[in-house]
Amino acid sequence: MYDSSDLRKGLKIQIDGEPYIITEFQFSKPGKGQALYRCKLKNMITGYTMDRTYRSGDKFEPANLEEVHMQYLYKDSEGYHFMNMETYDQVTLTEEQMGEAKNFLLDNMEVDVLFFKGTPIDISLPTFVELKVVEALPGVKGDTATGATKPVTLETGYKLQVPLFVEEGDILKVDTRTGEYVERVNKR
């Protein structure tokens, strides 16, 4: 059991039998009375968000979640298919469950799939992925202002802003948490 003093951003708790993750957290101690814990919670199954305020001494049940190391296989009309590398069982996640993670998935990529009561609900990607640039406009000569960027399209179809020197065929390291360019890994 968690106590209200354990609350923090990223903590996964169970409310009314469903898993929630704390997306925002604020602690306040008024002059008199109990401390207050203001939380923004996101339902990990439906995506519904809500605001709740808790008092010191409140108890919370940890979310009954299991993380399984899996391999991404393919995408079709049903969704994104993953395989457990130990048991060879396959599961499918929908487009909504994938969220922004779909922009960074490559065939055969190893990821962690989060299960709640045997049902897949979320995916954890590696922090950084290396993706190939498939479309890049040439940088405009003389356009060398500090921090100048241009749009490119990666092999997954994801578009992002990168420095002018990046060309088609380059391999880029991308941060999956923010979706931003980190560095060019190699030139072709």
Image (spheres, rainbow, N blue to C red):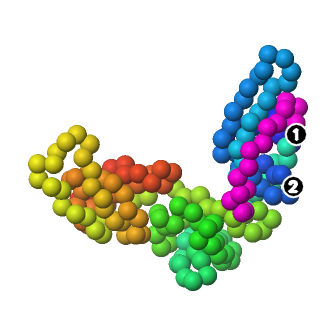
x 38%, y 62%: residue: 159
Snapshot quadrant of residue 146: top left
**Image height check: is 129 above or below 96?**
above
Q: Position of residue 3 (x, y in %)?
A: 84, 36
Any part of residue 70 in sight: no
Question: Which residue is painted at 55% across and 82% down in the image?
Answer: 76
The residues bearing labels 2 and 1 have C-alpha atoms spaced at a distance of: 13 Å
Q: Position of residue 47 (x, y in %)?
A: 68, 59
Which segment is the magenta one? 43-58
Q: Is residue 149 left or right of residue 48?
A: left
Asked if labels 1 and 2 touch by Cβ distance under 8 angstroms, the answer is no
17 on left or right of 37: right
Residue 49 part of the magenta-drawn span: yes
At x 59%, y 66%, the residue is: 98
Residue occupying the far left of the picture: 142
Q: Position of residue 185 (x, y in %)?
A: 31, 55
Q: Check residue 16 in the rendering and tell me which mark sits there, or answer none.
A: 2
